[in-house]
Image (spheres, helix red, strand yellow):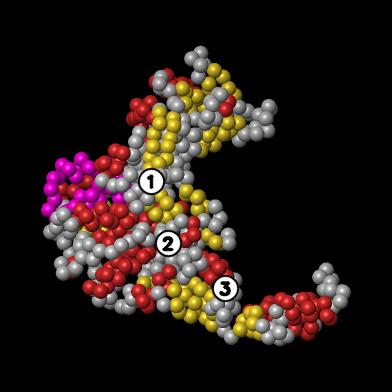
């Protein structure tokens, strides 16, 4: 895949984007610098022919030959360095591509950096033209500066475009990430991976306790923010609150009840249709960056239908993000008796067929518009929007069951298995699970639950199962409910509560038959708190406990 498929606005200055989309200037800018050092990967003869056409670039050629015993290097008469290598690993982005050969050489035990081998000051290549049959970048959307070509047409397009990618460029930083509310991982346990699955560029990776996003690889599709259940990942250009406010202002100027979201790629097609009665065309960076929080507030603002204009070039990850979130949103609306789909995807060929009257939803005709502050809080925005709608449309049930996976729900706790160890509480990223403070208890706030599964993974007794649902009454959903509670177990010496009856019973069951707990004295110590247990050992076992004792002796 070449840069022809890149959807990100990549310009010399972001001022042009600000003017076109009528949005605020980006608060963070990502800068690229390219000096025109190009690496061409492919058959040597073919690559050299292509290099002769890239006269404005400084080219290096590399051919991958698995049968090569070592790295071979030569210079052509024109001064082009030609390498034959047994393997090649490529990483990076425009202005910073690393081409590494893992096989060591006679002179060094370290992997070989080809950019260093041709004495590039930066130690990296600026551009890559990949002529190989198996692209070196497997990502659905490769990084800026990488051109993977599969045929002659794509090759000529790359040859034409690459000279223009020399100089200084910038793009907005499209995301903001709040690790504190991320549900990806806790204590090395796996939870939500929605953003990793949605990212088409490979910009998001796991770091054990959360995720890390490479702003140079991110190309602003926004799918990660759309699928994120907690709001840890948010779209930053524009921010959700700014996008919502901008749309509300535009709606206040007319009587539109249909919203058409489209990118610059389709601006000409939209303009060609002219005025569409009842329809507000809205130019956005990426239609996949607008999710359930935006859609819900638009319905509250009086919108009956939201059309997302896309074509065959839309990435599968972006389409899945839209489809999955639209399914959840429509489930919430169906729970209010609103069965007509609000969010729909259309193709450029369907623009001329848009009929504002046919997209009117009769159930919304008497809807009173409701505006509220959103503060860039995704879950709070969705909750407030559904509160506003449920005041005007009676829910078919106070609580509806939802298809999995859904970002709303509760957990079920098997009280016979649960020992109230609180492992689930310590791993919950959303403060949906709470301990009983002064009493052994497990409590829950439904409105906070992300259904991420971390609590289920953390439970040592497999006592937890997830249940996707949505409760329309926010007061009820925000109540603290007790899922399990026990009387505390008091130390038999000092009477201080230090565990639950369930934990003590579980310990006795698991240690039954263990050689260290065959006598009554050792078993009795299990019923003591830490302090009393240590004192009892020194009082009755002056020599200590022989932990290396042969149990069969």
- Residue drawn at (35%, 74%) of the image: 474
Closer to the eye: label 1 or 2: 1
Query: Is residue 175 among what the camera can see?
Result: yes
Magenta residues, as a range?
A: 260-288
Q: Secondary structure at mark 1?
A: loop
Q: Name the residue beneath numbered marker 2.
A: 230
Q: Are marks 1 and 2 in contact (CB under 8 Å)?
A: no
Indicate the secondary structure of the residue bearing disc 3. loop
Calculate the distance from the C-alpha at mark 1 to the C-alpha at mark 2: 23 Å
Dividing the picture into quadrants, the one containing residue 391 is bottom left
Left or right: 443 as drawn, with respect to 402: right
Quadrant in the picture for residue 105? top right
Q: Secondary structure at mark 2?
A: loop
Q: Is residue 67 visible?
A: no
Q: Of the residues under marks 3 and 2, which one precedes in the sequence?
A: 2
Query: Which of the marked residues, 1 or 2, is nearer the chain's N terminus?
Result: 1
Query: Which residue bears the numbered disc 3?
Result: 422
Does the segment drawn in magenta span residue 273?
Answer: yes
State if disc 1 and disc 3 touch (CB < 8 Å).
no
Q: Nearer the viewer, mark 3 or mark 1?
A: 1
Which disc is residue 27 wearing? Answer: 1
Q: Position of residue 22 (x, y in %)?
A: 26, 46
What is the spatial separation of the Cα atoms under label 3 and label 1, in whole angstroms?
41 Å
Q: Nearer the viewer, residue 285 or 355?
A: 285
Q: Is residue 417 left or right of residue 215?
A: right
- C-alpha distance separating marks 3 and 2: 22 Å
């Amino acid at each position: 895949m070449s840069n022809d498929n890149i959807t990100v606005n990549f310009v010399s200055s972001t001022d042009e984007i600000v003017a076109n989309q009528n949005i605020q200037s980006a608060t963070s800018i990502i800068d690229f610098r390219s000096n025109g050092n190009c690496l061409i990967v492919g058959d040597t003869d073919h690559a050299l022919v292509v290099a002769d056409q890239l006269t404005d670039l400084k080219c290096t050629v590399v051919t991958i030959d698995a049968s090569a015993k070592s790295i071979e290097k030569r210079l052509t008469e024109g001064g082009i360095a030609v390498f034959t290598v047994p393997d090649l690993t490529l990483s990076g982005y425009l202005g910073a591509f690393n081409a590494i050969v893992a096989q060591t050489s006679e002179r060094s035990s370290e992997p070989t950096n080809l950019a260093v081998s041709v004495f590039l000051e930066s130690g990296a290549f600026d551009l890559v033209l990949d002529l190989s049959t198996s692209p070196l970048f497997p990502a659905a959307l490769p990084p800026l500066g990488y051109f993977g070509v599969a045929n002659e047409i794509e090759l000529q397009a790359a040859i034409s475009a690459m000279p223009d990618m020399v100089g200084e460029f910038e793009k907005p930083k499209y995301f903001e990430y709040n690790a504190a509310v991320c549900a990806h991982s806790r204590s090395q346990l796996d939870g939500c991976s929605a953003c990793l699955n949605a990212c088409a560029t490979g910009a998001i990776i796991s770091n054990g306790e959360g995720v890390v996003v490479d702003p140079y690889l991110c190309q602003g599709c926004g799918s990660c923010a759309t699928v994120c259940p907690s709001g840890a990942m948010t779209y930053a250009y524009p921010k959700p609150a700014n996008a919502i406010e901008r749309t509300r202002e535009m709606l206040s100027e007319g009587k539109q009840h249909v919203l058409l979201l489209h990118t610059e790629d389709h601006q000409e097609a939209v303009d060609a249709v002219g005025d569409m009665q009842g329809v507000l065309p809205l130019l956005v960076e990426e239609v996949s960056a607008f999710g359930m929080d935006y859609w819900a507030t638009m319905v509250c603002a009086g919108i009956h239908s939201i059309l997302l204009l896309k074509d065959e070039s839309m990435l599968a990850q972006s389409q899945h993000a839209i489809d999955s979130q639209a399914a959840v949103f429509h489930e919430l609306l169906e729970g209010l008796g609103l069965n007509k789909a609000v969010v729909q995807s259309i193709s450029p060929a369907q623009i001329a067929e848009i009929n504002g009257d046919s997209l009117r939803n009769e159930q919304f005709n008497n809807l009173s518009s409701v505006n509220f502050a959103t503060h860039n809080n995704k879950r709070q925005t969705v909750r407030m929007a559904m509160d506003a709608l449920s005041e005007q449309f009676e829910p078919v049930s106070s609580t509806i069951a939802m298809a999995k996976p859904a970002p709303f729900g509760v957990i079920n706790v098997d009280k016979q298995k649960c020992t109230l160890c609180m492992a689930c509480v310590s791993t919950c990223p959303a403060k949906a699970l709470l301990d009983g403070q002064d009493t052994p208890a497990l409590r829950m706030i439904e409105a906070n639950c992300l259904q991420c599964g971390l609590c289920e993974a953390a439970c040592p007794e497999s006592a937890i199962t997830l249940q996707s649902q949505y409760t329309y009454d926010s007061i009820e959903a925000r109540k603290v409910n007790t899922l399990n509670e026990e009387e505390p177990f008091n130390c038999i010496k000092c009477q201080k509560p230090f565990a639950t009856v369930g934990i003590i019973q579980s310990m006795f069951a698991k240690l039954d038959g263990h050689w260290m707990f065959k006598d009554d004295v050792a078993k009795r110590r299990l019923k003591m708190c830490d302090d009393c247990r240590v004192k009892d050992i020194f009082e009755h076992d002056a020599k200590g406990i022989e932990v290396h004792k042969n149990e069969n002796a």
